[in-house]
Amino acid sequence: MRFEFDKTHWPTLEDGEKDCFLLTNGLGGYCSLSLIGAAARGDHALFMEARRAPNVRWHMITNMLEKLTIEDQTYILSSQRMKSDNPYMGFLYLNKFVYDDLDPYAPFWEFEVEDIQIKKSIVMVHEENTVALQYEIVNPNKRSVSLEITPLIRFTSKKEDSNTVLDTQQIQIESLPAPFTHSAQPTFYKIADDTNHVYITTNAALSKQSPHLFGEMYFSQDERDGRNAYGNALVNHCLSYNSTIKDEPDTKDTLYIIISTKPYPYTKDIYNQLAQNELSRRKELLQQCKVQTELGRQLVLSSDAYIVNRDSTNGKSIIAGYPFFEDWGRDTMISLAGTTMVTGRFAECKSILKTFAKYVKNGLLPNLFPEGGENPMYNSADAPLLFVNSVYEYMEYSGDYAFKDEILPVLKQIISSYQNGTDFHIKMDTDGLIMAGEDLEQLTWMDVRVGDFLPTPRHGKPVEINAYWYSALMIMEKLTGDSSYKTLADKVQHSFCEKFWNENEQCLKDVLCSDGTRAEYQIRCNQIWALTMPFTMLPATKEALVIKKVKEELYTTVGLRTLSTKDPDFHEIYIGVVQERDRAYHQGTVWAFPLGAYYRACVKYANACDAETERAQMLKEVQTGLEALKPWLREGCVSQLAEIYDGKTPTISRGCFAQAWSVGELLRAVYDYETLLGQQ
C-alpha cells in the first residue's frame, strides 16, 4: 500500500508530530521520526543501534539539522519543537511525505523552497546497524545552492532518560583515510567516545565545530503520556555540500550520507544499491506469503519489523512492540502464527520455537529472556500452553511433521507440569481446569501492577488459559495417540461448559474466582480465544452468542475493549502519568490484537454454518471490518497497528505505536478470511 500525505496533514507543527514512520533492521535497531521529520518522543531516533540484538539498544543519532542556502538566503528544512519556544519550522516547505514498502526510495520527503526542490530518502540496511540518507537537489535555474547537514548526536542507552546530561567534551570527531579505491573519494570519519562509535561516509565536506549542546527538544508525545518531555543532543560538526548541477536539463544533484557502526564500503551508486537490495528482500517476503489482498500483503510487510535476531541464543525472536518493548514469551507465542506462519517464514518460526524450547523450566517458558548475567523470568501461565498450540500450528502450516519427534519431550514436560503443579501456583484442579496465581503474581496478559495493587489480578481459573489448556490436551492426543490426553480433555470440556457459561449475560465468564468476586462476571475480551484455538469446546449455538456479546459490548473497528462500557470499573481514556495509565490499561482500553481473534471466530463460525443467510451475514461482517482497518494504517505509525487505543472513543493510538501481536493477529484474520473465500 502507498501512503501519501500532503500539507493538509501538517497545518501546524503540532499536527505534524502526531504520526510517525518506522524502519527496522532485523536486529532490534530502528529509525523512527514523525512524518515531518521531527523527534516527538525521546525514543524517536534517526539511528537507534542494536548493540546486542534485540534489546540492548543505543540512541546514537537523534536527527539531522538541515539548512538549505540559496544564494545568500538560508532556510531551515528541519522541524522540531524546542523548550525555548523557538521551534524549527521546516514543515512549511514540506509538500509531501510518502511511505511505500515497495518503493525503493520511500520513505521520502519532498521540499520546495523558491525554485529549488529537495527530495530526501532514507533506507535502513537489514541485519546491519546502518542508516543511509540521500538528498536529491533539483536546481532548474542553476543557482548557487548548498546544503548543510548537522548530526544531532546522543550516544546514550535507550533505557536512559532523554534528558540525561551529555558531556560535550567526551565525544570526538576523527577524520580517517578512506578505505576505498575510487576516483571520487568520499569523506570518511568516525564519531566516538570511550564506548560508542559510528562511521560516516559521505560526499559532503566535514567541518568540525566547537562541541556544544543543541538545545532542549520538546517531545509532545511523551508529555502526553506522562513521560519526560525534554531531551538534548550534542553538536560538534556539520557536513557541507555545494550543488553542482550540470548543463543538461533536469539533471539532479545528489548528496548521500551513510551512518554505520562499521567502516562502510563505497561505490558510486551506493544509495541505490542499498535501496534496491531492501526492495528485493521485501519482494521475496511477498512471494512466499499466503495472502493476496492488498491489506494482507501490506500486513505481511509490516510484520517484518518484528522478526529479529537474538544474540544470546543465536536464534530468532519477535520484538513485542516499538519503541518500548522487548521480546517476551507470551507476545511471541501470540504473534508467531501471523508473523511467521501466514508469511511462510517457516525457518524463522522453527528457530523461535527451538529457542524457547531450550529455556523451558518446570514446564514454563521464559516471559523475558536474559540479558547479560540476568536470569530469565517465567511469570506467564499462558505462554507455555500457547507454545504447545504454536508447535501444532507450525506443523500444520509448514508440513514439517518430523519436528514432532524433536519437540515432543518439551510438550510432555509442559503438560505434566500443569497437571501436577508448577511455579506461581499454576496447577490443575480436581475438575481438570487450570488455576493460577496468588498475592501479587501477574500471570496472564492482563498483568499490570500499580505498586502493591493489581487492577486485574485474575487469580483463579482464567477463561483463555483453560481454552489453551483444552486445545493443548487435544493436540497431545493427536501427536502421541495416547488416549489419556483425550480422556482428560473431555473432563476439561465438561467442567468448562458447565462452570464458565454465564447464563444471565449469554457469554463466558472471565475468570472463576474462589472468593466469588465480581471479576468472575465482568464482560471481557478474553472469552474470544475460546472460539479460535485449534480445538475448541463450545457448541456452535453458544459460540454465536459469544460473538454477539463481544460485538455488542466490546467491539470497535480497531480492536476489542478489555472491559464492557457498562462496567463501573470501565476507564474511558488511557492517558496521564504511569499510575493513571496502568489503572486504565485493561479496564476498557481498546487492544488491537483481540480483534484478530474476533474476526477469526466469525470466519470459523461462518465456515460451519449451514444457514446461507447467516453465513453470508457473518462473512460480510468480516469483510466490512477488515476494510475499516485500512484508515488505521495511516494513523499513529504509518503501515503499522498500535498496541492500544482509548476505550470509549478510539481515535488516536496509545502505548507502543507499532505492536507485533496487533499486526500478526489481524494478518492471521485476513488469511483465514481469504482461505475461506478461496474454498467457496
Image: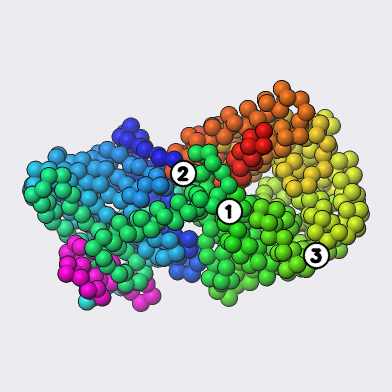
Q: In the rendered structure, which amino acid carries the disc numbered 2?
A: Ser
Q: Do tag 3 and tag 1 residues touch (Cβ < 8 Å)?
A: no
Q: Locate residue 641, reporting x and y percent.
A: 52, 44
Q: Residue at x 50, y 53 (%)?
A: 285
Asked if residue 168 lies left or right of residue 581, the reply is: left
Disc 1 crowd rating (10 Å Cα; few below 14, some 14-19, many 20+) is: many
Q: Earlier in the sequence, mark 2 or mark 3?
A: 3
Q: Is residue 647 above or below residue 487?
A: above
Q: Which label sits in the foreground, 3 or 1?
A: 1
Residue 237 figure quarter: bottom left
Point out the stretch of residues depicted in magenta: 179-207
| Quadrant of image for the N terminus | top left
Q: Locate residue 487, reporting x and y percent.
A: 91, 53
Q: Residue at x 23, y 63 (%)?
A: 268
Give the CA distance from mark 2 to mark 3. 40 Å
Residue 386 figure quarter: bottom right
Q: Secondary structure at mark 3?
A: helix
Q: Identify the residue under disc 1.
A: 344
Q: 196 and 330: which one is in front?
A: 330
Q: Earlier in the sequence, mark 3 or mark 1?
A: 1
Taking the magenta stretch, the answer to whether it contains residue 192 is yes
| Quadrant of image for the C terminus | top right
Give the CA distance from mark 2 to mark 1. 20 Å
Residue 412 - label:
3
Q: Locate residue 408, reporting x and y percent.
A: 77, 65
Q: 582 and 10: which one is in front?
A: 10
Q: Residue at x 27, y 38 (%)?
A: 95
The answer, for residue 366, to whether it is visible in the render is: no
Q: In the rendered structure, which amino acid carries the disc numbered 3?
A: Lys
Q: Secondary structure at mark 1?
A: loop
Q: Locate residue 24, reporting x and y percent.
A: 44, 56
